[in-house]
Image (cartoon, rainbow, N blue to C red):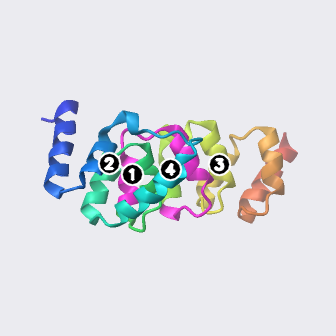
Amino acid sequence: RLLSGDLFDLGRWFQEQLDIPMELKEAAFDPAAEVPEEDDNAELLKGNLFVTLGKLKVSQRVLLAFTGNSLVRTVLLKDRNRIVRRFVLRNPKITPKEIETVCKDRQQDTEVISTVANNREWTRNYNIRRLLCYHPKTPVVQALRFVNTLYRRDLQLLARSKDVPSHVVSAARRRIMSS
């Protein structure tokens, strides 16, 4: 039986076994290491972290994806390995704000966008649904499902958009005409 405290201890044990560099161990579990997006040093720190994380083994990056702070999660969402990206989305500390950032990224992988679109907890958030409708890599079936929940102003913008599939644009136009 694993309790939440035991799971945290298990994560620490895995980190010790995987020989993750000490600065990453401390940064991954330190809530004070959360860096706001507006910070000027955040980009520099992300760059250094990107290089450091790139040198780790996949198993080490997977563990950090599941246990790391927001800065580590942000960098690992851009990782080449899809398993690492999948574990970032399974991280219990991921916030709706981070999911919105994922949805805004036009370079994001189709699998990640599809995972976000299939998660009911995240799609209860209107901004996430709206961003998924505007994202060109959102599967059409899921985007059409979200079009029916958009406000009129967002529908008008979506109907004029050239970045989304034509089925989604035509569904937005039909919804405008019917209301």
Closer to the N terminus: mark 3 or mark 2? 2
Task: Specify whether 71 is left or right of 103.
Answer: left
Rendering quarter of residue 151: top right
Q: CA distance from mark 3 to mark 1?
A: 19 Å
Mark 3 surroundings: few (<14), some (14-19) or many (≥20) residues within 10 A: many
Report helix, strand or loop for mark 2.
helix
Q: Earlier in the sequence, mark 4 or mark 1?
A: 1
Asked whether disc 1 touches disc 2, contact meaning CB atoms under 8 Å apart, the reply is yes
Q: Is residue 82 magenta?
A: no
**Distance between the Cα atoms at labels 4 and 1?**
12 Å
Residue 110, position as x, y percentages in the image:
53, 63
Residue receiving disc 1:
88
Tags 4 and 1 touching, CB below 8 Å: no
Amino acid at dot 1? Val
| Magenta segment | 84-111
Main secondary structure type of the part rendered in magenta: helix
The residue that mark 2 highlights is 66
